[in-house]
Amino acid sequence: MKSPIEDESYVKILEKIIETSFDGIYVTNSSADTILVNKSYERITGLKREELIGRNMAEFVSRGVMSEATSFFVLKNKKPLTLYQTFNTGKSALVTSTPFFDENGEIKMIVTNVRDITELKKLQDKDRKRNDENIKYKGIIEELKLQIASDDYIVAEDEKMLNLLLLAKRVARVDTTILITGETGTGKEVLAKYIYNNSARKDKPFIKINCGAVPENLIESEFFGYTEGSFTGALKGGKIGIFEAANNGTLLLDEIGELPLGMQVKLLRVLQDGKFERVGSNKTIKVDVRIIASTNKDLNKMVEKGLFRKDLFYRLNVVPLNIPPLRDRGSSIIPLAEYFLKVYNEKYGIKKTISNEVLKYLYEYNWPGNIRELRNLIEMLVVTSIESTINSCNLPSNIREYMRMDEIDSSDNISKLSDAVGKVEKDLISKAYEKHGNVRDAAKELGIDPSTFVRKRKKYV
């Protein structure tokens, strides 16, 4: 039976894997003769592969090219060895040599992984500097936390959001108009409620209307109310609008960018004078309402295109507050996940925990749906996972696919080429079958017989 390593396509794949490895790879046979060198080894050692291939390591040690040959130790003791090694270039490296045995238990080749510790030193220095910055950063965070009110529904561990909350708390005390911007799902309504709760109007009404959810022909009556008989279907006695309902309180105009141009003119008058008339009435009503508007649209661009009135934009944009997307608030992701886990555990009477692996996935995911996506995901995981601990297998496929790690590229040590082949083989077979949906076409793309494809697929299923 033909071995996968003998298949030309797999040989090419392995060559690419070895050649693109960040670490140097140096392979000898059982006699310590050099049989393979990759580009990174040349970069780290300053030695060229044409100088090395086919020559014995003993020669390099005797000439002082290498300070010590780990391969000789491995040949003698038949076990891996790791040590520091210096080269005549002046570079030092962490070298790990690992034996590769044949079917009879004899050493067939030795794979040596070489990592430049100069690079590691740089990383260590960066890490040390980062730790120092983190200590300072944590101090800033704690200081900011002390300056803002602690609300159960707001979870913020990042400096950007804490500074935003600090500003929001300051402007909450005055009745200035506020425009909250941010992507869908970032928590614009939550921030609006935070402002309301820290304002002098916190004991007065808080009314929200989604400007994009009301039919255009009903927007005016929703905003200002109407009198009895003002139009077909009008309620007996008429109805007050949201401005009257919010009198002396706070009105959140959500999705303000969806408001039709015709209605924008009427809204502008109310914001300027605090006066309006109900639909079907000439009686002027005066109200005292604090306005907070929110949108996920770029109103500046809408103004340029004539889709939003410039005068209304400036009237709303007195204090702009932009909520950063969750992908830019990495330090808040895990605390938010844990908060939502607590909320839904209590709501459904469940005691679920989240594995460290899943927390890593959550931290590194880009969250296009922001906090709303995270909240919905945690609720789904809590109610659908069978085990008490939520593991990566419970995550939806889009997150697993986004976070799929290339184990070969990220590995510091390729100990067995057969293992590397297996990982690549499994991945290629899975992708080919997923792409074509049938054995014949998938096998054709991989350059193997359908019977071989079926056998290998059963091996990995």
Image: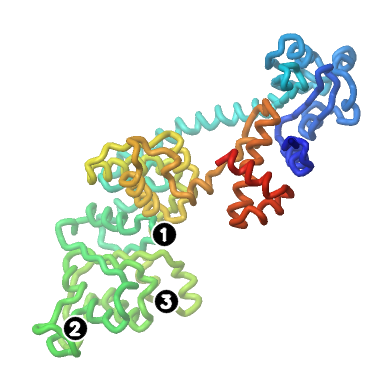
Seen in the image, is 256 located left or right of residue 303?
left
The reply to whether callout 3 and callout 1 are in contact (CB within 8 Å) is no
Q: Amino acid at mark 1?
A: Gly
Q: Residues within 10 Å of mark 1 (few under 14, many from 20)?
A: some
From the top left corner, tell me how far across and down residue 270 is, in percent: 26, 77
From the top left corner, tell me how far across and down residue 453 is, in percent: 66, 46
Residue 8 falls in image quadrant: top right
Q: Can you identify the residue that label 2 sits on?
A: 278
Q: Can you identify the residue that label 1 sits on?
A: 182
SS at mark 1? loop
Residue 318 falls in image quadrant: bottom left
Q: Is residue 202 above or below residue 252?
A: above
Q: Is residue 386 visible?
A: yes
Q: Can you identify the residue that label 3 sits on?
A: 308
Q: Between marks 2 and 3, how big is the CA–CA gap?
A: 24 Å
Q: Residues within 10 Å of mark 3 (few under 14, many from 20)?
A: many
